[in-house]
Amino acid sequence: MGVTICVGGQWGDEGKGKVVDLLCESAQMVIRSQGGNNAGHTVVAGGRTFKFNLVPSGILHPDTVCVIGNGVVLDPKVVLAEVEQLEAAGADLRNLVISERAHMIMPYHPVLDRLEESARGDDRLGTTFRGVGPAYSDKVRRIGFRVGDLQKLRFLEKKLDFVLPLKNEVLVKLYGAPPFTASAILEEYTDYANRLERFIRDPFPVVQGALARGERVILEGAQGTMLDLDLGTYPYVTSSYPSSGGALAGAGIGPREVTSTVGVFKAYTTRVGYGPFPTELEGELAEYLRERGVEYGTTTGRPRRVGWFDVPVARYAVGVNGIDSLAITKLDVLDELERVRICLGYRSKGREEDHPMANISHLKHLECEYLDLPGWRASTREARSWGELPPQARAYLERISELVGTPVGLVSVGPERDQTVWVGR
Ligand code: IMP
């Protein structure tokens, strides 16, 4: 059956949660590969809404093994709150595995995130303040704490003796903030160790076993390609690798196992935080789409910036991730518009560009070339097959597919599981 990677093709919030949840119907395992509780997934099932930050979206399928993978940075208190919420709702968590290699958010990480952001002044990134950037920085500096350290508290204590003075020096001397004490951290994390113990495992035999049995494994990415540390709009990116390469590294799986890569895209575009956004809309139309699409961050509640569908971004995402099928979400948000626009390419300093440039100042100051298409002015929310979509909506999706050079495999027309049009099935 092999591995399906589910990757965000834009700036995150594309609706990967719903797509992963649907793909899980035929999967035995889902692995969350990177990111932390900066991400938020909303899954609506049976009229109930679940919001997850860390636990993979597949958790609502009782027979699916859900792995929080090596590449994740995990805030123990956030995952514990999710565990409690799920158990209260009657979910069976025997199948939840947390990799001993995943890194942990420590109490000083969110504090440093906030202080670093305010030190940047006008150049701030608009992070989620969850400590994700500082935690990944410590991982790269090799002073991070891993989930497996919770099983060796003497080792954790010793490491804290070395690491905490480094952190406190920055907090106190650079920012004039209060220091943290080792004993308080140790007490807090000892409690987490006791409560998380039943989930902590070495994921290698678990994942390799599933592959050897020929099971279907879904890799659930967080954020999106344009927020990738290497491939996105640096420095206005997250600190991990949301692309398919990052998903493989974060899950500990080799490329030979991959049988398909699904790119999830909204039928328009959104972005939270600062940084270039070529097709961004302002004014009444932006306000309308934000309200109709409920474009407010799942994690922070911040209003999302909104814009038209951007083909150069999508084509780039297809190329760098090896996407072989598009999942287009939230088509219904465009239902009432008289006209819909697709960005075909950019013009920058007199040159035509067909993909996002690395130079963000060029990316900020460009003109978009648009293709205008008539809107469908009819509800798509009840459509369950390609033929039930209005002809103009089909034409819109067909143009996107042609321009991006990739078939559409799924269209989402509402948050519920059944508000889905499978194409070519
Ligand atoms: P950080 O990941 O909190 O460091 O934030 C860095 C950038 O990534 C900011 O622009 C955030 O708004 C953005 N970001 C982080 N996580 C998500 C997400 O799940 N969806 C959309 N944007 C995100």
Image (cartoon, rainbow, N blue to C red):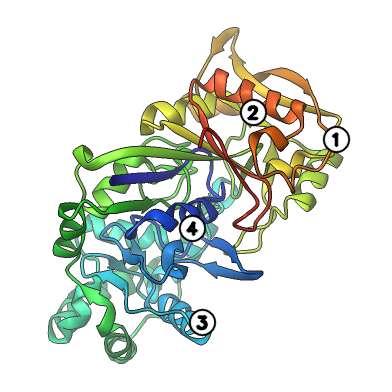
Give me the C-alpha separation between circle 3 and circle 1: 40 Å
Residue 121 image position (x, y, % from top left): 57, 52
Q: Which residue is mark 2?
A: 397
Q: Earlier in the sequence, mark 2 or mark 1?
A: 1
Contact flag, marks 4 and 2 (Cβ < 8 Å) = no
Tell whether 67 sits left or right of 262: left
Residue drawn at x 62%, y 55% is 418
Give me the C-alpha separation between circle 2 and circle 1: 15 Å
Tell whether 96 sits left or right of 276: left
Give me the C-alpha separation between circle 4 and circle 1: 29 Å
User: In the structure shown, which secondary structural element does the residue marked by tag 1 occupy?
Assistant: loop
* Label 1, ligand 1: CB separation under 8 Å: no
Q: Which residue is mark 4?
A: 21
Q: Quadrant of residue 257?
A: top left
Give me the C-alpha separation between circle 4 and circle 3: 18 Å
Examine the rendering and report whether any part of residue 362 can be seen.
no
Contact flag, marks 2 and 1 (Cβ < 8 Å) = no
Tell whether 421 sits left or right of 134: right
Q: Which residue is mark 3?
A: 85
